[in-house]
Amino acid sequence: MATQTLSILDNRTGKKYELPIADGTIKAMDLRQIKVADDDFGLMTYDPAFMNTASCKSKITFIDGDKGILRYRGYPIEQLAEKSTFLEVAYLLLYGELPTKAQYDEWAENITMHTLIHENIKKLMDAFHYDAHPMGMLISTIGALSTFYTDAKDIHNPESRKKQTYRLIAKMPTIAAFAYRHSVGRPYVYPDNNLSYTANFMSMLWKMTELQFQASPVLVKALDVLFILHADHEQNCSASAMRGIGSSHVDPYSAMAGAAAALYGPLHGGANEEVLRMLDIVGTKEKVPAFIKDVKEGKGKLMGFGHRVYKNYDPRAKVIKTLADEVFEVTGRNPKLDIALELERIALEDEYFVKRKLYPNVDFYSGLIYQAMGFPVEMFPVLFSIPPTVGWIAQWEEMLLDGEQKIARPRQVFLGSGSRDYVVMSKRK
Ligand code: CMC
């Protein structure tokens, strides 16, 4: 017996129902028993955009949006950003605990040994038009991986899942870097397994004719921290896409192509690209008040502001703001930072934003760092796609192993036409 229940009195029938409350939720299926007649389908909930519906139980990531808290497997994001590395965080998210030295070494070795991609994948990427958006290339290539690793269909086999996990985490930077090199017309650089995960990515992006690429340790660390911050964010649009598509039991590459596509949109991972475009439109610090006025009049959004869950400062944005100073010491200050700071200052004092609890999110400052590092804006969503590979896989596997999950299939409220007879074309008005 549940210790807490919700009593519902149906005024239509006078019947009373007791619905158990567990973990702060009632089961939507328990509402189905509320009927006016035996042939009545039963009561449903209507929740467009899942504003108040938990679609799963999870042990991976915790967010308290009102307090601005983000934890991976219980560890505060600030501590992980300061003390951990991306590969260690990846292990934590996937397996639930921080690795011992032996576990970490084996894990890092397995990722490093899967960084190469098949030569035919390289040829496939070559086929894209010279000005193809690198995110379109990334999404297509992730999907194409399923044709190279047909063993990935064996999703109920833990060994197979482990293998695909290594492959996906290892190959994402290679594919991302190849997409970038293709877009700038440079030869692809193969992975250098003597480098760390992030340093190797930078080498594949920027190595020219030197024997080994020497990345700035400050920038390597900064990119690693950015990867930590983006590794998982519980049931966001792309993770939900991964779970939803994966619930059909398709292979993880196909599911992940869908997750990456969800991330591409300007309301999700494409937002940092939009922030930079917005800063260009604003142009100067002096024009910020006029821009804010336009936003308040509904003429556009303040990109990089607002969040479905955070109604406080996004904890990741706080870390990134500090990181920006360290990066700018090496790269030189991004002049757009002043416009961004002024936008933030004015917005945080303005009643429109205060009333709606709109604060800077993770994308507000990340683009400025990416741009200072030398990335074109088209690469921003690609960069944002590498770390959540870990979260997507963790969410996918948790979904597969959850006995309560089934194929995702929402209901609808049908408001269209009732039954009517077909009319031949000559008689239509
Ligand atoms: N600028 C101006 N007004 C805004 C903004 C914004 N960035 N975001 C929300 N609002 C307003 C919105 O118009 C609405 O006003 P009203 O109540 O008068 O209709 C109110 O605030 C509530 O917004 P909402 O659209 O109902 O909130 P949501 O939870 O559906 O949307 C969001 C969340 C992130 C899509 C939205 O805040 C947004 O579009 N922000 C800009 C895009 C962005 O930065 N996205 C990155 C999100 S963080 C990275 C990630 O995880 O993907």
Image (cartoon, rainbow, N blue to C red):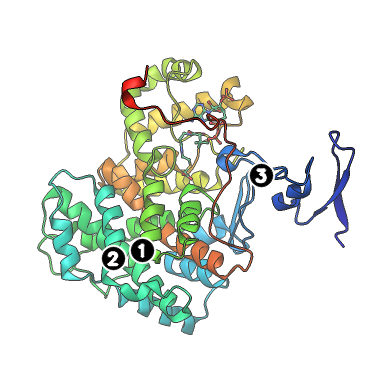
N-terminal-most mark, 2 or 1: 2
Secondary structure found at label 3: loop
* Three-letter amino acid code of the residue under disc 2: Leu
Residue 67's tag is 3
Residue at horizontal 49 percent and vertical 63 percent from the top: 396
* Three-letter amino acid code of the residue under disc 3: Lys
Query: Is 83 placed above or below 62 here?
Result: below
Residue at horizontal 38 percent and vertical 34 percent from the top: 275
Query: Is 199 placed above or below 43 here?
Result: below
Query: Is 264 placed above or below 275 here?
Result: below
N-terminal-most mark, 1 or 3: 3
Whether residues under marks 1 and 3 lie with C-beta atoms below 8 angstroms apart, the answer is no
Camera-nearest label, 3 or 2: 2
Q: Can residue 224 be seen from the camera position used here?
A: no
Whether residues under marks 2 and 1 lie with C-beta atoms below 8 angstroms apart, the answer is yes
* Quarter of the figure with residue 167: bottom left
N-terminal-most mark, 3 or 2: 3
Circle 2 residue: 145
Q: Can you say which quadrant of the picture contains the N terminus?
A: bottom right
* Three-letter amino acid code of the residue under disc 1: Tyr
- Pinpoint residue 132: horizontal percent, then vertical percent: 19, 45
Circle 1 residue: 253
